[in-house]
Amino acid sequence: MFYRLQPVLVFVVVAFVGMLTAVASWYTIDQTNRLAFINVAEDAVQRVGDRIENHMLLIKSVEAHFQAVGEVPSVGEFQVFVSHLQKTEQFSGVQGLGFARYVETGPASDQAISAELARNYGLDRTSWPETAEGYRTPIVMLEPSNEANMRALGFDMYSEPTRRAAILAALAEARLRASGTVELVQEDSQNPQAGFLMYTPFFAANSGRLLGLIYAPFRIPNLFESALRRPPVLPVHITAWDGEPAAANLIYTTESQASTRMDASPATVMSVEVAGRLWTIEIRPSQDYHPPVDQTRTIMLAIAGFLLAAALAASSRAQQRTIEVGEALRQHSERALTDREFLLQEMKHRIKNMIARVLAMSRQTARSADSLSDFTESFSARLQAMAASQDLLARTSWQSADLQTLLVQELRQLFGPDFNEGQLQGPDIKLNEVAAQAFGLAFHELATNALKYGSARSDEGELNIWWRIEREPGRAEHLVFSWRERSKTALDEQDLSAITRKGGFGTKLLDATMRVELGGSITTSPDEFGIDVTIKVPYDRVKVAQQA
């Protein structure tokens, strides 16, 4: 069993080892690519963090300028200062730098704000919108003074809850603080973008009185793009949330699609602190990202493993077939030698039996002949009959034969053409090819033994033969053949021993035909005056099969 499964086992084992090698290679390359992408992700987050730090430094520089002046500088001074800041790379992504007064709500403060706006920018505008809060933080300076920033002047940031929360945090901690996501006042209503603001309080140098808040508005997409598009451009897909990842907290996602490659690295999640707030950033490879190590070699390794397994299995099968063919040739040679030896022995046995028959026929013919010419004529006729019978059996090739006809032909060779068939009793039975040959040999052996040692040696001997089909309830049918021969006088010890001895070629021949070929049995019962032989074989093994 194991021998036949050897090619399959070779294929399974080699393919399994090849797959393990491919999996190990895939894992190693995947880990290398993941580490490489983590470095890219860290670079992207570092860029965003650096950009935020630069923006915070801009606000701190404005705060330092205000502190150097000791009061809120004039618009002209502030414009000059901001114009110098605009020339730096840090200003990229900033909507502007400004100042909002911190005043109590009321007509007096509204008039003061209106006057300051008119003085700074020539605007006829007061604080807006209406509010129920006790304080206001209207924007009185915002540079650069472009059209979008001009729209924001006078806006009371304290009136909006998200901005107010950041203002209160900056006032409570007296340091820079960022707001949550808002829609900037500068935004065009047709294409608004998410934004946020940073605030830091400013106090008068002499009195320490709170004058207002220095602040900067930012567009979140501009901030991310200014950080990520700096050469070299990073092939990443970024999604950012203000706080925990949730749909309500989403503040930014890149326009490019995430990579759908099978070997794409998984998402890396990091966080960035933005002036007291925590942004969560998820970084995935974009479609432009290519892993530093290609997994093609792993696929080729797996294919090579399967091909190697198939080749070794085919080689094992070829060797197995060579061994099987060699073993078949050896067995065939042994069978051929055995068959040749058996044929030689059978030929020798048949020649001896044939000689015995001829001698027996000559003695019988001589006993009944009145003259030499009578003996010659009778003896020649019997030899011709025997030859005709052998020729008939050879021409039919033992394909099928009637049991009684086969038996009569054999006995007539011994007793002549006038043999009395009344001594034979049994139904008509057609024997198949194997059974015909087996019974033909058995009849030949029994008749020859009778001729040489038994009742056929004299005219006074008796021979009774009968056959039948036995049907036992619940069991298969059997053909039973009985051979009974008796002499008038007791057989001498030599003849009795000859017809009952075991181990001779004739006995072996009977065993081979009845026991081995037909699966039956043969029983011999010797007697002082003769012998009884009973042959019993399954009827299914001897009858001619019906044509479909």
Image (cartoon, rainbow, N blue to C red):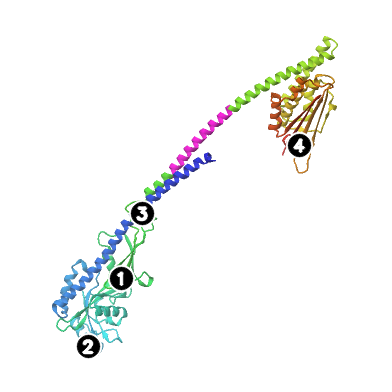
State the mark number for residue 278. 1
Quadrant of the image occupied by residue 349:
top right
Q: Position of residue 510 (x, y in %)?
A: 71, 28
Overall secondary structure of the magenta section: helix
User: From the viewer's perspective, is residue 50 above or below residue 463?
Assistant: below
SS category of the residue bearing label 2: helix
Magenta highlight on residue 477: no
Is there a contact, CB below 8 Å, between mark 4 and mark 2?
no
Q: Amino acid at mark 1?
A: Leu
Q: Amino acid at mark 4?
A: His
Q: Amino acid at mark 2?
A: Gln
Q: Residue drawn 76% across and 44% down? A: 474
Q: Which numbered disc flags the more N-terminal residue, 4 or 2?
A: 2
Q: Nearer the viewer, mark 4 or mark 2?
A: 4
Residue behind mark 4: 478
Q: Which numbered disc flags the more N-terminal residue, 2 or 3?
A: 3
C-alpha separation, residue under disc 3 versus residue under disc 4: 77 Å
Residue behind mark 2: 111
Asked whether 319 or 458 is in front, the reply is: 458
Q: Which numbered disc flags the more N-terminal residue, 3 or 4?
A: 3
C-alpha separation, residue under disc 4 versus residue under disc 2: 134 Å
Q: Which residues are magenta?
A: 306-333
SS category of the residue bearing label 1: strand
Asked whether 259 or 504 is in front, the reply is: 504
C-alpha separation, residue under disc 2 versus residue under disc 3: 67 Å
